[in-house]
Amino acid sequence: MYYDLINTELGLIYLQADDQGLKLITIASDGYQPPPCWIHHPKKLQEYTRQLKQYLEGQRQQFSLRLAPDGTAFQHQVWQAIQAIPYGETRTSQELAVQLGNKHAHQAVALAKNVNPIPILIPCHRVICQNPRISCRFGLDLINLLRALEKGHIQPKLRPL
């Protein structure tokens, strides 16, 4: 596994990929250290970091990257539906459940959203759940920041490493 990182006011954003595509985004708190098996390789992740920086700077609304998150078939269906939500818009987990053909699956949709390994690129912040405690694994503060970014209310600052 290869990784690179971006320093933002959101925190250090670690991007992890293999030859199949992007596997994981981790927004790290102070003191986080990537596992020793990860290899720091900025060149291999150059396009991922470039597009993510453009998004954070308000210059990109869609990504054209190869994603390879690990998950079940249902989770992949949910994540694909989430990626189809337009920039700056939101949908409820109930709306996504109906879109996926099972109006009773809103809790399963919410749980799939919650375990999304590639937030921002699979924009789980665009999904509103009935239970506000079910959020992206990074919490409501990050969700609110990303929604504000997409509405043009803020622009996170990139910082040098």
Image (tube, helix red, strand yellow):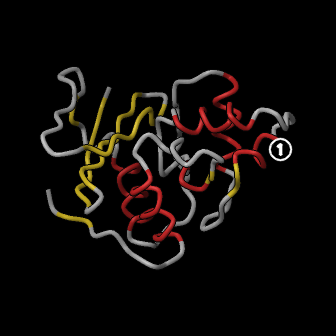
Q: Nearer the viewer, residue 138 or 104?
A: 104
Q: Tell me the kind of residue under disc 1.
A: Gln
> Camera-side residue: 97 or 81?
97
Q: Is residue 20 above or below residue 134?
A: above
Location of residue 109 in the rendering, given as x and y in whole percent from the top left corner: 68, 36
Residue that carries the numbered disc 1 in the rendered image: 99
The residue positioned 68% from the left and 56% from the top of the image is 85
Q: Image point 68% across, 23% down: which residue?
A: 73
Q: Which quadrant of the structure image shows residue 7?
A: bottom left
In this rendering, position of residue 41 left or right of residue 63: left
Of 42 and 28, nearer the camera is 28
Q: Is residue 19 left or right of residue 79?
A: left
Residue 79 higher or lower than 132, as above or below: above
| Residue at the image position 24 percent from the left and 37 percent from the top | 41
Give left or right: position of 1 versus 90.
Answer: left
Question: Dot 1, how many residues are within 10 Å of its Cα: few (below 14), some (14-19), or many (20+)?
Answer: few
Quadrant, the C terminus? bottom left
Quarter of the image for the N terminus: give it: top left
Q: How many marks?
A: 1
Q: Residue 62: give x, y in percent of width and height.
A: 57, 60
Which secondary structure lies at badge 1? Answer: helix
x, y percent for residue 97: 78, 40
Residue occupying image coordinates x 28% and y 36%: 3
Task: Point out the residue furthest to the bottom here.
Answer: 153
